[in-house]
Amino acid sequence: MQETPFLKIFLQETPNLKGQEHLLNRFKKLPSLGPFEERYLKKILELSRIRKYDPGERIIAEGEYDRWLYAIISGEVRVLKSDQEVATLDQAGDFFGEMALVDGEARSASVIASEETACLAIDSSFMDSLSKEDHYGFCSVFYHLLTIMLATRLRVTTGKLVEAEKRLDACQKILQDGLNIIMGW
């Protein structure tokens, strides 16, 4: 895993996108951001940056704390739990880093760029600055999108679990059959 020198981060990260309204239409096309009202999208962009990563570069480190949420603009990332790959994300608009925002815990997995990758890095602290009315409106859309995304990921994970259980059952049967042969049962 590559460590990123400070100068490289500086050269591969834009300043915040405040006043970059020309980007609104581009980001509205991302499925994860399209449902937001324009005023919320502007607020999101005010505290966001575009970050570019080289293949093998770490974006998120398991166990660290931060308030950044990422949406893929282009490229592909691998999600690793205890150095074991658990997912690949490669669609424009795919979010990652959301679990730490939902529960406030440390990052549950690391995320590594598989290829040249550009992400919209969103500083989630902007949610703290919303008025009470805006907070409810924004959060209802945000958490609805998270719910859909997490439900989709849970369906995929459940499918993988079922397949792993079938393989485990088959291995146990083979072992039991082998034991029966050895023991003469």
Image (cartoon, helix red, strand yellow):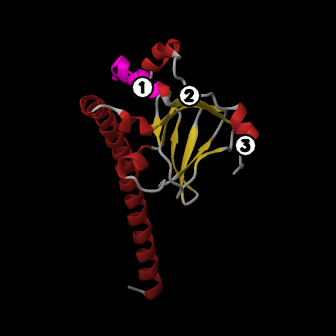
- Counting residues from the start of the chain, the first of labels 1 and 2 encountered is 2
Residue bearing mark 1: 43
Q: Residues within 10 Å of mark 2 (few under 14, many from 20)?
A: some
Magenta run includes residue 33 = yes
Residue 29 sits in quarter = top left
Tell me how far mark 3 sits from mark 1, CA to CA: 27 Å
Q: Is mark 1 on a helix, strand or loop?
A: helix
Tell me how far mark 1 sits from mark 2, CA to CA: 11 Å
Q: Which of 67 and 184 is in front in this view?
A: 67
Image point 28% across, 28% down: which residue?
A: 134
Drawn side of residue 149 relative to residue 80, left or right: left
**Badges 3 and 1: C-beta atoms under 8 Å apart?**
no
> Against 159, is 120 above or below?
above
Residue bearing mark 2: 16
The magenta-colored residue range is: 31-45
Q: Nearer the viewer, residue 44 or 148?
A: 44
Q: Which mark is residue 6?
A: 3
Q: Which amino acid does label 2 sit on?
A: Asn
Residue 59 sits in quarter = top right
